[in-house]
Image (cartoon, rainbow, N blue to C red):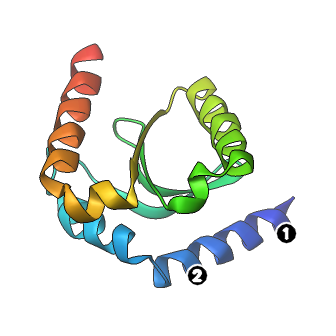
Amino acid sequence: MSGDKSIMKSNARHLRANMTEHEQLIWYHIRRKQINNIQFYRQKHLGPFIVDFYAPSIRLIVEIDGSQHFEEDHCEQDKFRDAYLREAKIHVLRFNNHEVKYQMDGVLEKLHYVIEQIKHKR
């Protein structure tokens, strides 16, 4: 089991060093507690998954989906993954590459809104 964990850590480290253009775009806006003073971490290992961005203080994941996420197999994997994370009481917020690149104001607005909703439910 510890071998699996070290492999996941290594994979997460690799993904952090090789973020996609769209991950870099959103990271620029959410790093250093820029959104509602919430700390996000990149490419975080959670259970059997590595998530794009995770804010542990409010249990929120932000995923940036490329075009492969619209393929049937990948959609099924995402549904399974989201269900697993919801069962762990973690919120999952998804944006696609197009939204991040061309509608960043809307993405950030929705992110602010979701964070406020989560905070008020506590």
> Is the residue 106 above or below the residue 97 in the image?
above
Circle 2 sits on which residue?
A: 14
Which residue has dot 1 on it? 3
Q: What residue is at 38 percent from the left and 61 percent from the top?
A: 97
Looking at the rendered structure, the kind of residue marked 2 is: His
Question: Is 112 or 47 nearer to us in this picture?
Answer: 112
Considering depth in this image, is 27 or 44 the residue closer to the camera? 27
Q: Residues within 10 Å of mark 2 (few under 14, many from 20)?
A: few
Residue at the limit of the structure toward the top, as seen here: 121
Residue 18 appearing in the image: yes
Q: What residue sits 70% from the left and 36% below the top?
A: 80
- Percent across and percent down for residue 22 are 35, 69
Name which of mark 1 and mark 2 comes first in the sequence.
1
Mark 1 residue element: helix
Q: Residue at x 50, y 62 (%)?
A: 66
The residue closer to the viewer here, 8 or 114, is 114
- Seen at 66% across and 53% down, the residue is 49
Which residue type carries mark 1?
A: Gly
Where the N terminus falls, by quadrant? bottom right
